[in-house]
Image (cartoon, rainbow, N blue to C red):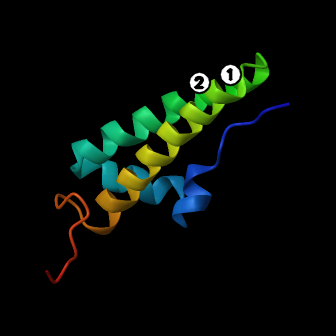
């Protein structure tokens, strides 16, 4: 049975740490909400035995959002630009 993906384990942060960051960062808050939504869509598609292309596209979208979350946590407000650039 498909299960949701553990974003917090991938980030190496607790849910509480991410929630604290979201309190002052609306973009991060929006990205986490989008991630949770797309993660549910992946689980739903896998549960419904959706075709591989559909599931792959949803997983790619989930990964793209996760990468944006990492960028926002590591370099808030910079869209991933290097800190010392």
**What residue is shown at x 44% (from left), y 60% (from top)?**
17
Q: Please state if 8 lies on the left or on the right of 27 as rendered.
A: right
Q: Nearer the viewer, residue 24 or 71?
A: 71
- The residue lying furthest to the left in this view is 85
Q: Residue furthest bottom?
A: 84
Classify mark 2: residues with Cα within 10 Å, few (<14), some (14-19) or many (20+).
some
Residue at 31%, 47% in the rendered image = 28
Numbered tag placed on residue 45 in the rendering:
1
- Residue 75 is situated, as x and y percent measured from the top left of the image, at 25, 67
Farthest residue, direction right: 1
Q: Is residue 65 visible?
A: yes
Tag of residue 41: 2
- Viewer can see residue 13: no
Quadrant location of the N terminus? top right
Residue 11 lies left or right of residue 3; in this view the side is: left
Category of crowding for the residue at label 1, using alpha-carbon neighbours closer than 10 angstroms: few (below 14), some (14–19), many (at least 20):
some
At x 62% / y 24%, what residue is drawn?
54
Alpha carbon distance from label 1 to label 2? 6 Å
Residue 61 x %, y % = 48, 38
The image quadrant where one finds the C terminus is bottom left
Q: Are marks 1 and 2 in contact (CB under 8 Å)?
A: yes
Q: Label 1's element?
A: helix
Pinpoint residue 79: horizontal percent, then vertical percent.
22, 57
Tally the numbered discs.
2
| Residue placed most toward the observer, 13 or 45 | 45
Q: Secondary structure at mark 2?
A: helix
Residue at 65% across / 44% down in the picture? 5
Q: In the figure, 31 relative to 80: above or below? A: above
Residue 66 to residue 33: above or below = below
In the displayed structure, does residue 58 sit left or right of residue 45?
A: left
Per the rendering, the mark at residue 67 is: none
Residue situated in front as seen by the camera: 57 or 46: 57
């Amino acid at each position: 049975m498909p299960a949701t993906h553990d974003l917090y384990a991938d980030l190496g942060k607790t849910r509480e740490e991410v929630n604290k960051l979201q309190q002052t960062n609306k973009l991060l808050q929006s990205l986490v909400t989008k991630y949770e939504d797309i993660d549910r869509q992946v689980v739903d598609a896998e549960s419904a035995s959706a075709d591989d292309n559909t599931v792959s596209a949803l997983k790619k979208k989930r990964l793209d959002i996760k990468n944006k979350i990492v960028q926002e946590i590591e370099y808030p407000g910079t869209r991933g630009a290097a800190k010392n650039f």
